[in-house]
Image (tube, rainbow, N blue to C red):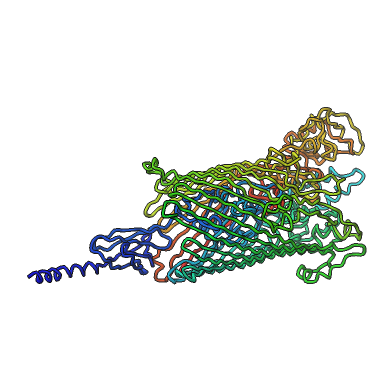
Amino acid sequence: MNKLLVLLTIFFILPFTLLAQNKTIKGKVTDENGAPLDGASVIEKKAKKGTKTDKEGNFSIAVTVSGAVDLVVSSVGYSSKTITVSGNDLVSVKLNKESVTQDEVVVVGYSSVRRKDLTASVSSVGIKDLKDNPANSAAEALAGKLAGVQVSVSEGAPGADIDLFVRGRNSITQSGSPLYVVDGIQVENALSVLSPQDIESVTVLKDAASTAIYGARGANGVFLITTKGGKNTQGKTTVTYNAFYGVNNITRKLEMMDPYNFVLLAYERAKYTENPTDTAVVAQYIKRMSNYDTIGSTYGNYANPMDWQERIMGRSAAQATHNISVSGGTAVTQYNLSLTSNKQEGLLLNSEYNRKLASFKFDHKISDKLKVGFNVRYNVQSVDGAGTSDVGGAGSNRLRQFTRYRPLILPGQQEDTYDADLDARNPGNGLNELNPLKVLQAEYRKRTITAYNFSGYFNYSILKNLSFRTTFGYDVNKTESKAFDDTLTGTSRVYNKLPILTLNNNDRVTINNSNVITYSNASLFKTKHAIDLLFGHEIYETVNKLNSMEVRYFPVGLKPEAAFANIGLASAPAGFSQPKPFSSEVTTRQVSFFTSLKYNFNRKYLLTFNLRADGSSLFGPNYSSIIPLTDSTNRKWGYFPSVAGAWRISQEQFMKNINFINDAKIRLSIGQAGNNRINAYGYTTGYTTPSNGGYGLSDALAYTLITPSRLGNPEITWETLESKNLGLDLSFLRNRITLTADFYSNTTKDLLIENKFPATSGYTTQYQNVGSVRNRGIELQLGATVIKKSDFQWDANFNIAFNRNKILSLGSNTQFTANSGWFSTANSDDYLLQVGRSVGTMYGLVVDGFYSVDDFATTPYVNAAYPLLTTQYTLKTGLANPISVLADLVAPGQIKYKDINGDGKITLDGDRAVIGNALPKFTGGFNQTFSYKDFDLNVFTNFSYGNDIYNANNLEYSNTYGVDANVLARMNGRWKVIDGKGNLVQKQINSTTTVGIAPTDLAALNAGATIWQPIRTTTGFYPMSYAVEDGSFLRINNITLGYNLPKTLLKKAKISSLRFYVTVYNAATLTSYSGYDPDVNAKRGNPLTPGVDYSAYPRGRTFLAGLNLSF
């Protein structure tokens, strides 16, 4: 009976048991927009087994329990979700796109860490931040997106140089460029050789707690760039194609005189400069243009005006970018191949930028212990046709030519006709303006950059928590610059009016190897203590080779290509020689040892310690010993420690009931980093030979001995940055709002300054570590998901950075000055470095309007040659006399300067003052992204406030020293020296006498004058406050509207995603600056003179249309 009952029980229960074991759950997985997700993972949490969805997002999974079961649903790029299923109904699961959270892993130098565990100050951007900015320049794509990072563009030319500064300018005379590390390898100027489409993420290390691990190269900040690699797609290959096309148009032009006012000024100039016994000046004017009586009728409504700015830069410059990538992989192997092509016409005629890039990234897991990978990149880019400020000299600057050239076509001439009277009026220095179209044809410029980069790594897990990684990088960069000037140009006219070429080749080879052993234990001794410890060694070697030549006196009519191919055709005239060629080869080496310790207790208390020792050949040829020595040879070794701590107060018990705060952390750090970006061989004595032609003092044959120039200093050493940082990280309202605030103080000591020596010493300068500079500031980063609905989302990110720069010491000096060199004849320094002030301080005379009739004593004057000029004008006693500056007799209507020192005269030594500063008070950006169903809109705005621009264009373009030189339209309000009938009413007779009509009549004639008389010589180019303008701006940098085709329409074509978009780049700029663009730094080669605008290439507005395709 009992056996029967047992059998009956088994028979009764067995079907239910079998049913429970075979229970099947079916469902569908979609994204937040309802589109099915193919390949999503569905796993039974308890049994650890699962399945994947099909192309329709459907899945079916057999579970082992009869009751409620937990399923974990996940997909690449989406946040995973755990659901509980108790019945047999069809399950519907919706996954949201993954967002950046506090659990994001951030690369921080030879290692990585969760964002919420950071103890240092970092800023980062990823694919999401870069995708809506279809720029060709990776550096420009970062502008305004990283708090504390200032992106400084030299000009708007395609391929123009861009500088980045992290937390101000930490050096005075040396490079302020940050260190770039790409996939673990140091790469010079990485943002200029990487395509934005190839970048996965950019992390910027800003305080010494994070940069000290890079030692001597970390003082200016470190950019850690991760390029796109393959993903584990279960073997599926993904192909993406991104392309955009567009046109670029000039947005604003300088306001120059129209034909009528230009001719009126030309007559006035001719009348003023004529000699009564020789009327050739006025006669030439009448012959070429018009008699005064017919100026109004002829030019008042001139039939052939010429806007040269529009003619030379008014085209719709086309551009096209294509990028195709093939990626994929498995759990063992991942790969990514990317090909990019950029072609961009410049606004300037005959200018173009071309770039081709290819990269291949490969990662392979040989075993559970061994992983290897490599990355190969190739980049070739060329700039055809020069920009405008690449040379910067007045005689060879293109923008100066077409801005100042006469705004009309003379009768009988065509716009591209050679000036018939050029030889009669063009001086030997070539400063007079020439027909801009002919100049474009006469000048040939081409710069080609070819770069190869290989990097690889080997990662071996020695034990469970112990691993070893070695990386190797080999980087080759070749730059070739060609320039050819035909007979028309000012450059060739100086040398017998024969063609000239210059050829520069600069090759750089870099080898980088690092070896790191890491120990990581998240539960030390099975406690709440966690530790990460690493030891490393690194070598870095760079070889720079430069070859440069200038070859003169080519046969007339020779084309540029023929000249470069046949340099031997150049032949110097009798008695002259060719300039000497120049070549150099500089090898620098650095060897380093470093260690890092990261500790945390229960993720609540965190501590980081870094130490690096660097030995560099820049401070001496021998660096084999790292043991501290008492003699100066130890100067070549630098030691850079840092320590940082963080306290996650949100983990404390007293914060548990504050529900709206998800995470709160206070950070504190202090440390040192170095700057070895200095000129090589500063520790040796230098000599020089004449460089202004031939082997003598000119291109005429002569001989001379070499002379000492710079005295060697074996004691020079690193510039050392001492950094202190206090930070706060907050995340609240379920991580929908994040706030990061940093307060920092960075002091750079042992600044390397080239101090001047008295001429009697036999040397001119010596490098000395004598200065210090401080940067203090505040940075704020705020991110928020403002609205998040099922079909609408609004995300916003805002950052702002305040920085104050102050020079603390200049050694035995209290100040010295620097020259921007914007004009070859302006010999006066225009920037001041002074203790207590900041770098970028502009220095010059202070303009105080112009002299009026009331500033002069008058006496009767009689001269039969000038019967209308009956009064002599003499500056009143007690008024400051500017004769030493003007090199001319002062007269009514001339520019007036303030007598700063009150000595009764205007001098450069005594009356220059601070007139501006190039450094902004704050910078930042505001990014907003809106998504509604399949539409997305991105609006990005960046801004800069409080920076001045040294607009040197104001100085030259308000002056009429050159024949046919047009001037700014503001000079229509000038003080006039002719009356309404064309009669001369004021003139300087000689070096002691200025005469004019009666004072009341002269004052009445100029009652409406708003600016001084521009008929001056080049001595009027001394630095002055008139050239300084407010450079603050608010720019709507980028507006992008996109549309994603619904996946239901794409599945039949086996397309994963297809997005179309339109973009307006540089949509609008709010600024009071009168120049082309306020974001300019035309003289970037000198770190002492930032913020100069002299004939810089304008930046246009770009309209783009593009697509993103993935399948």
748 left or right of 20? right
Classify residue 184 by image quadrant: bottom right
Classify residue 916 by image quadrant: top right
Viewer can see residue 500: yes
Q: Nearer the viewer, residue 416 or 432?
A: 432
Quarter of the image with the N terminus is bottom left
Instruction: Locate residue 113, reporting x and y percent.
Output: 49, 55
Viewer can see residue 297: no
824 left or right of 1038? right
Q: Nearer the viewer, residue 995 or 398?
A: 398
Residue at the image point whose x is 76% and y is 33% from the top: 900
Instruction: Locate residue 905, reporting x and y percent.
Output: 82, 33
Instruction: Locate residue 644, reporting x and y percent.
Output: 54, 47
Residue at the image point whose x is 85% and y is 39% from the top: 888
Residue at the image point whose x is 86% and y is 35% from the top: 995
Q: Eyeballing the image, is 444 above or below 1101?
A: below
Q: Nearer the viewer, residue 497 or 150?
A: 150
1078 left or right of 666? right
Q: Nearer the viewer, residue 929 or 538?
A: 538
Q: Residue furthest left?
A: 1
Quarter of the image with the C terminus is bottom left
Q: Eyeballing the image, is 1039 above or below 852?
A: below
335 left or right of 850? left
Instruction: Locate residue 550, reporting x and y percent.
Output: 80, 63
Callout count: 0
